Amino acid sequence: MPLTELGELEAFLALSEELHFARAAERLGLSRPRVSQLIQSLERRVGGRLFDRTSRRVALTPSGRFLLDRVKPSFEGVRRAIEETRAYARELRIGFLGPFLGAVDAAVTAFRATHPGWPVSMTETRWGDYFGPLRRAEVDLLVSIWPVRELDLTTGPVIAEYPRVLAVAADHPLARRESVDADELSAYTMVELPRATPSEVREGFLPPSTPDGRPIARGGEVKTQHEMLSRVATSREVCPTSTALMEAYRHPGVRFLPLTGLPPARAVVSWRTAGESAGILEFVASLPSLP
């Protein structure tokens, strides 16, 4: 079908729904005379009038209704296929908190095995701008700490789980221990996350109190994983984290001790509900899902 015919059909469908030339033209981003020209051209093709038009009203003729019933389902299918193909062809952008790089690498590798032609890029995000890149549409998906309780975001599967560890300075009194229990944290000062970090992360990952209810003192604010390691190495502050960070980052002045009494850290994928696309759904469908 020539491109001009597609334009004629699009004008026909718009006018059949609007029954008003000016509104149809505005909807299509065309001038009113151009819409009229397209309708007239289509009427010449079919050999009859498709609309009765007067100065006061526009209405479908029987021939127009006949054509509408047959064209609309097919045309909507073509339009949907074009939109899905556009989404398929666009690069899929994955944002991730640094410690979850390993989980993201594994997920992207699995996705590329089944979608070899689909371009994917990865971008590290920061604690201080936790959901910012996702909400600004700078990334399509974000791998972050579970849970995510944001009304404008859709949460997908948990893709990885990591035991908890406590980061302490190499010369900290705790550094000689084999492990630490979370109830002991009330005796120490914990690094602080940026105020912009979501409450579910601030309260869950770095809890305000021990499991038995005693408050945990807060120290200096850190905005990145490297800042956290540097602060821990040069002070008496400690930081509950996970083996994900321990595997991704190293600092000669920091030791990681097994931390009992806290649930494991979990990596979860989320995306803007309003920005959901075929690419996002294809990627999410390829992900592993932990119970």
Image (tube, grey):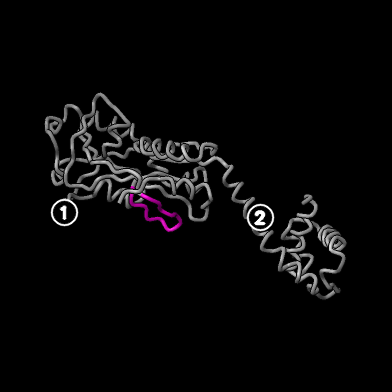
Q: Which numbered circle lies on residue 268?
A: none
In the depicted view, which residue is nearer to us: 71 or 227? Answer: 71
Instruction: Give the x, y percent position of residue 267.
Output: 34, 45
**Height in image: 164 above or below 154?**
above
**Residue at x 37% of width, y 50% of height:** 157
For the point 77% across and 69% down, which residue is it?
20
Q: Amino acid at mark 1?
A: Gly
Residue 232 is a magenta residue: no
Q: Which residues fall within the magenta stretch?
A: 146-157
Which residue carries the number 1 mark? Answer: 213
Mark nearer the N terminus (1 vs 2):
2
Residue 189 at x, y = what percent? Answer: 20, 40
The residue type indicated by label 2 comes to Arg
Q: Is residue 10 above or below residue 49?
A: above
Q: Position of residue 58 (x, y in %)?
A: 80, 72
Q: Nearer the viewer, residue 200 or 262?
A: 262
Name the residue beneath numbered marker 2.
79
In the depicted structure, whether residue 236 falls above or below residue 11? above
Q: Is residue 232 visible?
A: yes
Q: Do the numbered discs 1 and 2 sit on residues whose CB atoms are within 8 Å?
A: no
Q: Closer to the camera: disc 1 or disc 2?
A: 2
